Image (cartoon, rainbow, N blue to C red):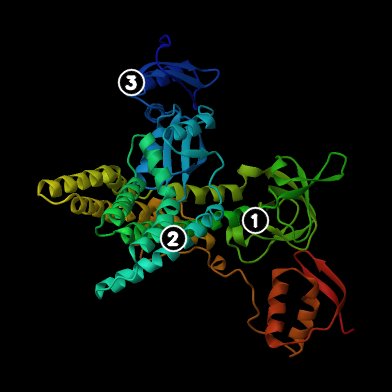
Amino acid sequence: MAAMDTTLPRLTLPLSGLSCASCARRVERAAAGVPGVATATVNLAAETAEIAYDPGLADAARIAAAIEAAGYGVPEERLVLNIDGMSCTSCQGRVERALAAVPGVLGVAVNLATGAAEVRVARGAVDTDALVAAVQAAGYAARPDGIRPVSQRFGSGTAILVLCLVLTAPFLLDMAAHLAGHHLLPAWLQLALATPVQLLGGARFYRAAWAGLRARAGNMDQLVAIGTTAAYALSVWHVIAGGPLYFEAAAVVVALVHLGKWLEARAKHGAAEAIEALRRLRPEWAARIAADGSEERVPAAALRPGDRVRIRPGESFPADGTVEEGETEADEALITGESRPVAKSPGDPVTAGAVNGAGLVTIRVTAAGEGTVLARIMRLVQSAQASKAPVQALVDRVAAVFVPVVLLIALVTLTGWLAAGADHATAIVNAVSVLVIACPCALGLATPAALVAGTGAAAQRGVLIRDAAALERARGLDTVVFDKTGTLTEGRLSVVAVAGDPDTLRLAAALQQGSEHPLARGVLRAAEAEGISLPAVQGFRAAAGRGVAGTVEG
């Protein structure tokens, strides 16, 4: 066991699978064999490895891979950050590199479309504040709140978008008139229309461009800012000194890019709704039974394994557990896909988010909060949306050099026209054209946005996709085999035939008026479709799992 080098950064990794001193020595040799690792010391009692390493040569992911190759494990956990300020794949790559450089990080997946960063870290080795600080140092903002509800962001830029579109519409008419040899807008009116678009609509691009410059990196917003500003400034000068005007180019580009961002946010909104719908399945409050048998209303998040909770008819289960008292039926369609309610009696398991039927039951909590099946489903959907498909590897490689290459081409264009004897206005217009044409960055935005929309739409329909790679491979499927046809339904039971007396449906529906059971709702819908007027029911009784009884018309 070598002495710890105090001059190098130190990393503490949790370990699993150790049983003796020889295990500790094997882990030390495996970690020390990674290029850049100076020393490695294993504490067998604490099951941790203290490692001194050169960050330029080694990182936690390589060290963990070496330890796992030796037959041992590095327990990990998953953290989700909300990233603000990303506008293109170069921003995405910058955030990924910043997070990956934090000691203890095992893997990073940043999704440009959702603004979420999923970070795999060695358990207990990374402070969330360190991740947030790394993102901020790269020129972006981060919050450790998971995926923020996109609905909060969806309408934030709508007013600016409407303003840009309204002020840009006259330019489109003027451009159409110009094809016929006429100009409808005088110079002063073009200036008045373009200025709010450039200053208000372009503000978001200026902010993002400045953030990229502070981080000494290029992004797509810089292309938009430079291109539109050059066209606007040149036109302002020509209003004073005389010359052709390019206000319409600057205004149209700002408006169209804003429209693209709005459409992108709309797609994100639909994807995020899938997660929000899952989150809404779990109730906010629960009726916990205290040690003295009294009932107290507590937040569902405060429940712990071992707690006893009372669930009333029609309520959702706030946690995973087992039934201790009472009998009922649980509607688990949104969790398991099972279209029919499942009978529950003492000893049977229940799942958070499922809806209790007609019985009053008491459950013993076995898993709460992030440990429930529902929470794991939500994490699966979030992970799928944050993951990258193999096709994005190509997109990322192209986008990483896209911005500097475009800027270089624009500079070469400007220099070339000036060297060829063109005037400054012509040279600037041609250089700006390069920037304007390149600025939408459809390559970098379309792929992640399509993946997010696909996984979100599938989740809303009850199909969970493990990751983006699985979604990409699915394009080659020609046959899908299901092992349980009972779950391939709409989850709405309906009456398909009525046997016996023609009055049977009327009497059955009248009796079912007192029930909230899905079978009852199916019978009531059938009666409503037939336009049947239902008499009252007296003495209604429901027996969980066995049916209902009552008196109708004597």
In the displayed structure, would residue 553 be above or below residue 492? below
Residue 119 lies, in percent from the top left, at 47, 38
For mark 2, give the secondary structure.
Answer: helix
Q: Amino acid at mark 2?
A: Cys
Q: Residue 274, located in which quarter of the rendered image?
A: bottom right
Q: CA distance from mark 3 to mark 2?
A: 54 Å
> What residue sits right under mark 3 in the picture?
36
Question: Closest to the observer: 22 or 553?
Answer: 553
In the displayed structure, would residue 434 be above or below residue 475? above
Local packing at callout 2 (Cα closer than 10 Å; few below 14, some 14-19, many 20+) is: many
At x 37% / y 61%, what residue is drawn? 188
Local packing at callout 3 (Cα closer than 10 Å; few below 14, some 14-19, many 20+) is: some
For mark 1, give the secondary structure.
Answer: helix
Question: Closest to the observer: 364 or 97?
Answer: 97
| Tag of residue 164 | 2
Q: Residue 525, located in which quarter of the rendered image?
A: bottom right
Residue 113 lies, in percent from the top left, at 43, 51
Choose the circle earlier in sequence order: 3 or 1.
3
Residue 383 lies, in percent from the top left, at 48, 47
Q: CA distance from mark 1 to mark 2?
A: 39 Å
Q: Residue furthest front?
A: 241
Q: Amino acid at mark 3?
A: Gly
For mark 3, give the secondary structure.
Answer: loop
Q: Amino acid at mark 1?
A: Leu
Q: Residue furthest top?
A: 3
